[in-house]
Amino acid sequence: MMLYFRGCTAREKETSIVDATKKLLKRFNIDYYTLDDENCCGSVLLRTGFEKEAKKQIKKNSKIFKGQKILTSCAGCYKTLSEDYNNLDVIHISMVLDKILKNYKFKKKLNVTYHDPCHLSRHCGVTEEPRNVINLFANLVEMEDIKDNSLCCGAGGGVKSAYPQIANQLSKDRVNQALKTNAESLITTCPFCKLNLKNKDMEVLDLTEFVLRCIDE
């Protein structure tokens, strides 16, 4: 049984990601549980320079996480739990979906594009798994800058809170790249990215929301 670590942004702001993830886990008979008193993984503290506070948070969480297989929805949580904690068994939802769906075949209807979250792609090298999943359901039309050269959405590292104008401009730049593909939807694999890339011209979905919609059609 896996511990599904939802992460702060999905748990508090982008709850539809949590809902979609739970429905997919149930659909494919994957046993999981969540923590009623889930705390932050410490990612934001680390990226904004509060290392002392982050270490306290990591120490506290490590007692709970010991011996668990941990599933994350968030790219930032995945990076933090897999690189800043000691010897945790962590997997991102895109990697789970890639494994359980690879033998499925679906009729491709949509043209979509994909935004690589910084923490998942250039930090952890997870670039193919989300694309494998998307290609099962849709025609993936790539943007100009992708994978480890992807443009940042602007939300991470405390930028959204400290420098909102910069965060908004980065988001506009990335959305403009997405619009140039003429895709119908923009898919990503991080709640932070989804939150900051939302716009009036193109639908933005988490990978779990996209997969669930395609399966239910």
Image (cartoon, rainbow, N blue to C red):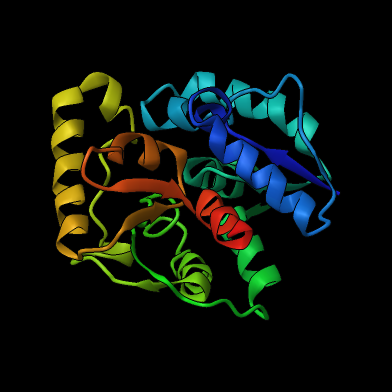
145 lies left or right of 97: left
147 lies left or right of 84: left
Give the vertical position of 171 relative to 61 (above or below): below
**Residue 181 showing in the rendered view:** yes
Q: Quadrant of the C terminus?
A: bottom right
**Residue 89 showing in the rendered view:** no
Q: Position of residue 64 (x, y in %)?
A: 79, 31
Nearer to us in this view, 159 or 4: 4
Total marks in image: 0
Nearer to us in this view, 28 or 58: 28
What residue is at 26 percent from the left and 29 percent from the top? 159
Give the vertical position of 183 relative to 188 (above or below): below
What residue is at 30 percent from the left and 59 percent from the top? 184
Q: Position of residue 67 (x, y in %)?
A: 84, 45
In the figure, residue 47 lies in which quadrant? top left
What residue is at 49 percent from the left and 29 percent from the top? 9
What residue is at 18 percent from the left and 56 percent from the top? 179
Give the vertical position of 82 relative to 51 (above or below): below
Q: Position of residue 142 (x, y in %)?
A: 28, 70
Q: Position of residue 135 (x, y in %)?
A: 46, 74
Nearer to us in this view, 62 or 202: 202
